[in-house]
Amino acid sequence: MTAPIETVRLTQRQDYQFDVHFADALPPLRADEPPPLGQGQGPSPVQLLAAAIGNCLSDSLLFALRKFKQVPEPITAEVRAEVGRNAEGRLRVLAIQADLKLGVPAASLEHLDRVLATFEAYCTVTQSVHSAIPVTTRVFDADGVALK
């Protein structure tokens, strides 16, 4: 069995604006660089990376909890990407902080310790970029209690 290949097609609209086509059935997403390069008419590549990491971590956490028939919804995520200059003076994503919040108190979930210890290992996107960009993940319950 061959591994699936995900294809995304980008079409330049103008300047730094691109329409990102994910699949025929999905509407395109407009991406754009912030000023002064672009007009900020859509998410930037850094924001798209942060969104991909936050979405994948949230999916992984939800999947792991649902394996134990737990209902943690609604899960929310806030992801911050630190952008700065590397040794060569080029802009790079230097670090990413992902904060996930469960929609319920931790006490209402069974097997939470086991889930928190393993869910990140199954996040395809985060684990793929983790070797190049440090990614820190924190998890909170609905009451704001830090769980990880």
Image: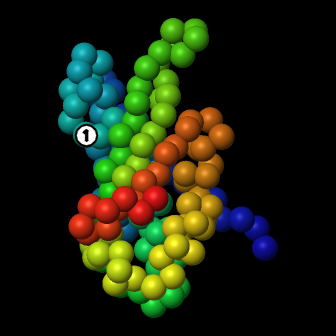
Find disc 1 in the rendering and name its residue: 42
Instruction: Give the crowd class for mark 1: few <14, some 14-19, many >=20 residues within 10 Å.
Output: some
In the image, residue 49 lies at what x, y percent? 44, 43
Question: Could one spot residue 51 in this view of the protein?
Answer: no
Look at label 1 and name its amino acid: Gly
Q: Is residue 68 left or right of residue 130?
A: left
Toward the viewer: 46 or 39?
A: 46
**If the image is split into quadrants, where does the N terminus sit?**
bottom right
Dot 1 falls on a residue whose secondary structure is loop
Up the image or down, 90 lies above or below 69; here it is above
In the picture, measured across the screen, residue 110 lies left or right of residue 125, that is left
Seen at 41% across and 49% down, the residue is 98
Q: Position of residue 64 (x, y in %)?
A: 52, 76
Q: Residue at x 31, y 51 (%)?
A: 78
Q: Is residue 15 above or below residue 73?
A: above
Q: Residue at x 62, y 61 (%)?
A: 121
In the rendered image, the residue lying farthest to the right is 1
Indicate whether 47 appears above or below 22: above
Relative image position of residue 24 (x, y in whole percent): 41, 64
Residue 127 appears in the picture as rendered:
yes
